[in-house]
Image (cartoon, rainbow, N blue to C red):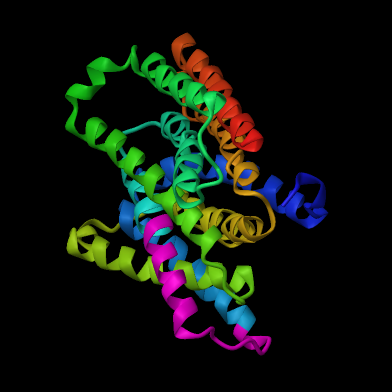
Amino acid sequence: MSIARVSTYAWLAFAAVSLFWGTTFFAIRIGVESFPPFLMAAFRHSIGGILICSYFLLRGYSLPPISSLKVFAVNGFLMLVLGNGLVTWAEMYVSSGLAAIICSLTPVWIVAFNSLTKGREALNTKIITGFIICLLAQILIFKDNLAEFSSTGYSVGIVFVLIANIAWALGSVYAKNHKTDTHPLLGAGLQMISGGVVLHIIGALLGEWSHFSPNSDAWWSLAYLISFGSILAYGCYMYILKHMPATIVSTYAYINTLVAVVLGWLWLNEQLTVAMFAGVIVTLTGLWLVNKGFNKA
């Protein structure tokens, strides 16, 4: 699919994903101050999924066949349970800006997995150079935060965000390569419900209900995440996965990162050192090279 053939609706959906998912890192950070993380992610996706599916069912749509439901269940686990659930937990210990910077590596993973599933999308010099630049950028970002790795929560949080990146990329490539005849937004709702159910189970098993006492800020954050992060942005993401090249879709992470870092710095007083800022720029440069190389391939 060429860029010239991408519709205006797809570009608008891409813009929504790029902007609103950048703000969700900020909203999650506020929410997990008092909302148990896995239950917060569970409420976010299950409520969003129920609202979406109810809308389509009331309009006369029928549930898709079992084969499609399996695809949505796999996507829900990879992208929402692992991808979003682990990031939500990690933000109890890792700043929203830093989580977004690490998540900006998602396009690298998407390109890597895409090249494995489709032989014609082979790696080239630009892609490999971009990978190396992104790796060096992460070293630059963390060089002033080495002391924080002595904290178990911080270290585990970083690992969880990395696992979440890989799971999200796997889910994106899986969704791209397993097309269904279901409306993309209805499919997104079914993924949210399946992911939400698993997240509720995880939260219960971890005993999160025993300290469930969200404050008003957390409830407002949840409302924002349901409406803009899940219903709007996730629905748009499922749409553009079907209507845009994967390499273009993956670039939403560039804008996400900048939005999240600036919001965290302005409103949450999160640290933004010269090294971190330089790391963001270098990371985005590496990602740009990866996508340029992928387009050339």
Q: Nearer the viewer, residue 276 or 122?
A: 122
Q: For residue 58: magenta?
A: yes
- Count of marks, rendered view: 0
Q: Give how far across and how far down residue 62 sits, in percent.
A: 59, 88
Can residue 288 be seen at all in this image of the molecule?
A: yes
Q: Magenta segment, principal secondary structure?
A: helix
Quadrant containing the C terminus is top right
The image shows residue 279, relative to residue 111, as above or below, that is above
Which quarter of the picture shows residue 52? bottom right
Q: For residue 5: magenta?
A: no
* Residue extent of the magenta highlight: 57-79
Residue found 75% across the figure and 49% down from its top:
11
Residue found 56% across the figure and 46% down from its top:
120
Left or right: where 23 falls relative to 89: right
Q: Nearer the viewer, residue 99 or 295?
A: 295
Residue found 49% across the figure and 73% down from its top:
190
Q: Give how far across and how far down residue 272 sits, in percent.
A: 47, 17
Can residue 91 be seen at all in this image of the molecule?
A: no
Left or right: where 211 falls relative to 252: left
> Residue lying furthest top in this view?
274
> Residue lying furthest front in this view?
120
Q: Nearer the viewer, residue 16 or 228?
A: 16
Which quarter of the picture shows residue 285? top right
Q: Give how far across and how far down residue 88 sits, in percent.
A: 37, 47
The image shows residue 131, relative to residue 168, as above or below, that is above
Q: Give how far across and how far down residue 9 sits, in percent.
A: 78, 57
